[in-house]
Image (tube, rainbow, N blue to C red):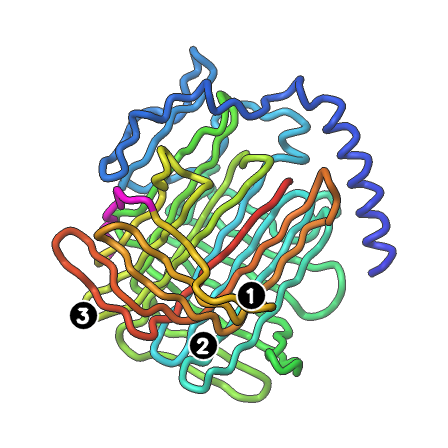
Amino acid sequence: MRCLWCVAYILLVILLLVGLAVQFLVDIEDSSSVSLLNLHPSQDIVGSTFDVAKNRYHTVRQRTPFTSLDVAHDTNVIQNLLQFKEFMWVSFSGKQWYVAVALLEFRYVGACVVNVFNVATNDSWATKFEIPFASLLGFGPTFYPSPRGFYSPFADSHKIEFREPIVTGTSASIVASGKDVTVDFSGPLRHRNGTRVATTLRFKATLGTEAMNLVFPFGPRRASMVVKTSGADAAALTLRLGQVDFTHTCAGVTAGFDYTRGLLRRNTTWFWASASFTTFGTRIGFHLSSIVYDVNNISAESTVFINDKPHFLDSRVYFAKVTSAPEPINTKWTVVAQDTVSLTFTPVDQHHGKLFPWPVLHGDMFHMWGTFDGWIRAGTRRYELKGVVGVLEDHNAVW
């Protein structure tokens, strides 16, 4: 493993030198050249995502699902090797179990990230399996297009698979089939007390007819493409921890999705919160964020979902720590938006991801799962939350 990291560092130095040498010759960020002022958070902005004649991206945000999130222009070598990012996160939420699986390909590193939380006993297991330069080495997450060449959770037979170079038994996949998305994982998880346990899990979620679909330009030929939903209908969770089998089949289980592809900012910062739950037969979920996709300080992706229908927020979402502690896991947060959101988040466990700690390439991410209390509003209805399990992420990367 140490030799693998040495090779990765050497490759990284070479790629960074090449990247720095051509920094001003490739499609760098130029947000001033992209008009975002026509985006009103509560409205759909539909149309072509890329203007071939003007050689630039347009801002698009709509409820009709994207069937493909492929880059609309020909990318160059530097963009393919250093700038392009793709990842998918899927969560399962029920009365007893909360499970999330993420497959991430960041070019510098590929990762499989999993967490399992027993709501009833407060037990938490997790893993974060990272492979430096996974795509160059033929490992890590691989995003396979559908037979029609499409990349999207709404693209039938699109799949993402994770392979690792060391025999630990870690494998994972996310497969779209019609409106269903099936998630599989097999490998060791570590309890927060340090003990390891062999784990297999599978769950299935069903996409609705609408979602939050966003094309967000960071420059004329640099954009991020996002599909998100929450509160989606979910089928039974099959889980094996060690020698113990669990099957979660009760009514009211829900799922959340975050699918992102594109050329993100070199300096990417975001706060993000998500959860899904049911109340009186209504499926509810949300994705709330700030900074990365802000237009006039209002996030273009902040959305509340009621029975799969997206309600775009037209207020700025504020994330703030309300308690101070040496460890982020012991810090409570508030998530607030005027007249629409008032939540307190209490962490239970976390992933702490650190990218290479160098001046030209570094990152720090705290992905925490825990409980939300408070309320959210969609339209004229207000929905109360008490002990609803979800996630909050504090992310900054120069990549």
The part of the image, by quadrant, that contains residue 82 is: top right
Indicate left or right for 23 with 248 as reference: right
Q: Quadrant of residue 27?
A: top right
Label 3's element?
Answer: loop
Q: Which residue is drawn at the image coordinates 34% and 78% (left, top)? A: 95
Q: Is residue 134 magenta?
A: no
15 up-or-down from 328: above or below: above
Residue named by callout 2: 238
Foreground: disc 3 or disc 2: 3
Secondary structure of residue under mark 2: strand
Give the quadrant of residue 243.
Answer: bottom right
Q: In the rendered structure, does residue 312 fall within the stretch colored magenta?
A: yes
Amino acid type at circle 2 is: Thr
* Cα separation between marks 3 and 1: 35 Å
Mark 3–mark 2 CB contact (< 8 Å): no
Q: Toward the viewer: 149 or 35? A: 35
Residue 310 in picture, x, y percent from top left: 25, 49
Q: Is residue 63 left or right of residue 280?
A: right
Q: Residues within 10 Å of mark 1 (few under 14, many from 20)?
A: some
Q: Which residue is mark 3?
A: 281
Q: Start and end of the magenta stretch?
A: 308-316
Q: CA distance from mark 2 to mark 1?
A: 31 Å
